[in-house]
Amino acid sequence: MTPLAAIKLLSWNSSLDVLMQRLCPLIVILLAQSVSGIEQEDRQFFDKLLRSGHDQLAAEFLERAESDPLISNGFKQAARFEKVSLGIAEVRTTRKAEERKKQLEKLSKQIDGLSRNLKSDSERIAFARMSGDFATAFADEARRDAQSIDKPRNAVPVDDARESIKVARMKLSDAADLFEEEHVKLRGVSPDSEKGQTRLDLLGRLAQMRLMSSRMLHELAMTYQPGSKQYKKNNETAAKELGALYEKYSRWMVGLYAHLYEGQCYRSLGNVGLAAGCFEDLIGQPTSSDELRRLVTNAHAQLAALWFESGSPEKSLDAPRRWLSDLSSSDQKTPEAAMLQYYLAKSHIAIAEELSETDSSRRNSLRKAGTLLSASSRVPSDVQAEARETWAELSKLMGISNEEAKDFDQAYMNGKQSIEQIATLKASLQEDTDLNKSDRQQLEDQINQQQQVASGAFQQAMKLADRKTEPKQLNEARYLLAWLTFESGDLGRAADMAEYLLKKAPEDVSAEKGALLGLAALEQLSREGDASASERMKKLADAAAKNWPNSEIANTSYNVLLNIALRANDYEAATRLVSKLPEQKRPEYALRIATARWEALITDKNAKAAKRNELYATLKKSFKQAKEQGKTFPQGVTAALYLARESLSQGRTNEAVRFLIDDQFGPVSKLIAKEPPADAQRFATLVAQSALEAYVAEGSNRLNKSVQWLDDSLNGLDKETALKTRLAVAVPIVAKLDSKLPVKKEVSQRIVETVLPLLGKIEKNAAKKDWNTRAWVAQTYLKLGQAAKEQGTASICMQSAASSFHKLIDQIRLDPEMAPTPAAAMAVQLQAANCDRELGEYEKALNSYEALLSKKQALLPVQVAVAEALQALGEEQKRSELLEESINGSRPNASGKNVFWGWRKIAGVTARAIATNEGHKETFFNAWFNVARSRYLVGKFSSPSDATTHYQKALSTIKAMRRQYPDLDGKVSSEKYDALEKQIAKEMK
Amino acid sequence: MIRILPSLTFACLMLVTVVVEAQVDRVRTTKGSKAGVVVGWNKNNVQLETNTGITKYPTSEVISVIFAGEPTELSQARINLENQGYLNAKELLSGIKLGPSANQFLKEDFAFMKAECLARLAVAGGVDGKVAGRELVNFQKAYPDGFHSYRIAETTGDLLVSLKRYEQAITQYRKLGKAPWPAYQVRSLLLSAKARQHEGKHSNAINLLKKANSIKGESTSGSRYSLAEQQFLAKLSLAKNMAADGNKKEAISALQKMILAVDDSAKDRSDRLAHAYAALGYCYAESGKLTDALLSYLRVDYLYSDNKEAHAEALYRLHSLWNRFGEARTAQLTKSKLLRLYGTSRWARE
């Protein structure tokens, strides 16, 4: 498309919104001209992001562009403008006025910032275009404000609206100046060149700004009292400006629209002749394109309004009415057509009001007005709200003056019309998000009122029905009356009417719809505790299924019948029902029964194993048969989940995975696709939990997202429920680490990877004082760290464990009563220190140990841990004094006794304890071994002359132990001593 | 009559040409096509006898050899193979039966195509890896020093990687390193490093890649693999391994410098950027910068999709990223695109 064509096309749109939508892609195209290859790629990429609907990502790309070294400088410059353009596009899609205003305010500041830093002509042109877009968006908002001043809801104070219009005109004028300035610079360039096309684009935009500015003046005039000085003056000036624009651009769309608005100004001034002249000029235009047809429709609408307002409504029913009836059905759904329909309806009403109430043409005219208003109120347009209101008033008028209908047809038509209006009012209630509370209430009141009107009309129709009445219409009236009764909440009566209809006209389509309604009513009654509803529902479903086999109602009926049987645990009746079904339906229903039986079994604590095996086999078989049928249904997914869970509990992980990812019923597949029943929170959680268990046990990569699925399924739940669920999932998985079964290395790795994020979330959600949960989390981290030893995640687990234990200690400090017992608090302190030691934080660990031992020295495991830590730190830092401390102890207390015992004292204490408890033997031999080892290490770190002395000491310790205990407490221990002895001998050589 | 004569003459000439064409072998090299009779080949060269004598063409430059009188299906299968249409190639090859008197080189070429096809399908998960492996082993035993030796070693290595038998894969890749061309030596190290990367041994991979980048030599014009290209890929792989080994910032910075250094006018610019942005996406994902990763992979998808390997990888990673961003529908569309465009690639199997 050439820029000229683009401009011409654009100028046809009267709505500023639509204008903006067309402008934005054009800017991208034009900006893409004359840039380098890399810059071109950046633009292409950005453009593709937008075209693919990734607006948010495109915005993030722009945000990153500034600091990304890979983005070309040219695009970085342009990104500043693109950001604003994206912002303007966002304004267009925002529905709430308040939000739009905030966005415009923000954009205004951004544009101000940009205006100070324009370096080149191309930047100035880009800035001008962007300013034009912004001015258009601003003017659109001002126009909305002006139109809402006399509306009961969301009214903007009149002064504010006027101020907005004035500011909008200034912005439009500023933008026009910018276009003018840039366009002048390009004078004389060849029209076919790139610059020539840019010049043409600027010219088109300049004309747009001028058109909108004059139109805003008309909007300003309309905020004053008709006939007032300001009203008159502004409209006259606007008409003059628009007339000049028409003269200047008469061959462009801009010019034609200027003429349309000029006519509007004259219409407002009451100058019927001049206004009609303008509109009739436009009506005579060729209508070869959609855009032209819309302009002409608009002109007809204006003309209809003019005739209505000037007291000649009958003239509207001439050319404008013919034009409307000649429009295609898609053209009849445009905002311009909606406007035309509205003014034609107003004309019909005006004509009807002139007629006497007994004149049959009166009702006919009103009915036509109703039809037009019904169509108009469905299309968003400037008159949509008015159309709805007028229609409501008209219905009231027709309903209130609801003189007894003379025959069935009239009553039936009245009822149908009300039903149609109910549907439109309900649509408004759902679609219009700007409605406030009182508007909603008003609409609901109107719906209730119309329901009563419709009920009255159909009841009248029943009374007036005679032999001549068309049975089809009579049954439809019966059905609609039943529906209205259902809507009013009288479920019992609605069900009665549906049953009657089925009995009276079993062949009629209205009876089928009635049966569905009856089933819904009875289902509701049954839930509310109506004892007879279930039996009635059974009868109605039975009759409906027989009457319309292989239909939607038959399916619903079978479902109802099956649900009744299953609810009553009457599996025999359910199975009998299956035998009556068409062949192709049987597998689905058989699986539903099998699933229901399984459900009942797993909730029965006394269920026997044999029964469980039998029902499991049935479920599996039914599942297989349903799969062969090839049809997917939600209960099949539930069955797959039950089968997977049972397989998991039996340890058949591969089988469980197969059920979970089954291509037809796989719950995981449904969860990913967010399809029912996996779109329900509880079901989704159970699927994620099962996937997680299977993943941990089997490790199929296909399930590696299970933690994410679990998180997603818990999204939006309250903290406590989410916490409980995560705990319920994590506990059995962690339990695997406790079991004596040899757990494969990769399985333990998988457990770690799976449980880590779970624990993080559990800890985050647990209350600060929830000792049990927090201690369990910390312990589990520690356990995972131990299980993941030698793997990458071990240190993460240990760090997390240390952090969790320290958090608990901090909490105990604040609230000493938090720990259930003092021993529990000490255990936590010990484990925190152990974690620090494992992580190589020896000093921190030693300080924690000291704090513990200063309370109670005779804690043998702690003393052993301290001696180990001292030895490890000494070895790591090659510090002999620490190694000596590991042998002889350190950190004397007030009474001069060492708080840290060291290996020698540990050996002494355990030597005495062995007499009463053989369990201390291992510690005793280990302690002496470490005495020798520390001495050996001191030797290693000493000068060669001193080393031998230390090595000799180490050897003496070993020899002494050998002498005293020849077997050194068994093979393992003996080998340890041997190895150390050899190492020392090697060093001594 | 006079008017018809020239046409008839032209038709006769065409016929003669076709007959002559059909009786010679053709060696397609990166520089053009040469007709003659293939009189010998080994892993380093193909010997073609023409009127002027025997010319040796380095196998590094030979794309394929078309034999005189070979079945049409075989020629079609070869084209399919070159374009990664493995399923079609397999189908075409299954209908061919060479007689006992067939040219020995043709028999070898046929056996290669069958083995290559099966192996590539196995890498993509469409065929049993063991079956494909047997075929490759048989080929290597039967033709240890043929024209296809280096390529079959690479394919065998790729199959072994897909079967997680990394040590054996590296043994195969090493065979490629014995080629007399530096580009092949770099490729050998690059592929071995990728095997190590799969294995999670990133520091080993880094050592191999550093070695690959230290190899000196000149890019031989017309070689299937250029030294510069292979070393560029090695540098990308080095960055990925550095990121996986914890040096994420350095890896990202190195990749950004490489991207900026890509010559705007280079013939392989698009290929280089495709691989480089895919590597950058990987490093961003490793660093937890998922939006940056998404944008990098999207660049490959939107701008550099001509490079099949990088594009397939980008689609695979995008599928997973879209899911992580909760865009299930977009993820599904991306997966469909991956399966549709690269259904027989290893990324489709992942």
Image: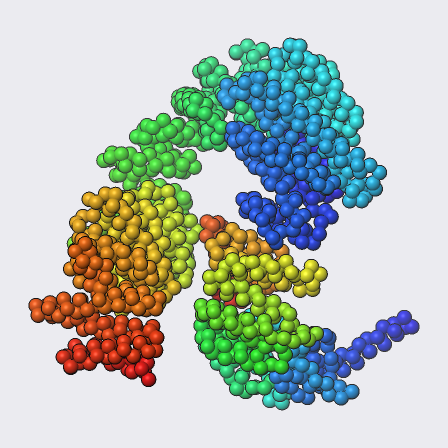
Q: Residue at x 67, y 51 (%)?
A: A39
Q: In the rendered image of this protein, does residue A99 appear above or below residue B190?
A: above
Instruction: Measuring from the top left, give residue B88's x and y in whole percent.
Output: 58, 70
Instruction: Measuring from the top left, give residue A481's x and y in whole percent.
Output: 39, 27
Q: Is residue A739 left or right of residue A399?
A: left
Q: Is residue B282 left or right of residue A525?
A: right
Q: Residue at x 82, y 78 (%)?
A: B13
Q: Quadrant of residue A87?
A: top right
Is residue A561 visible to us here? no
Quarter in which the C terminus of chain A is drawn? bottom left
Quarter in which the N terminus of chain A is drawn? top right
Is residue A715 visible to us here? yes
Query: Front-most of B69 and B328?
Result: B328
Instruction: Measuring from the top left, give residue B92's x and y in whole percent.
Output: 59, 74
Q: Quadrant of residue A85?
A: top right
Q: In the rendered image of this protein, does residue B336 appear above or below residue B130?
A: above
Q: Quadrant of residue A877?
A: bottom left
Q: Residue at x 41, y 61 (%)?
A: A702
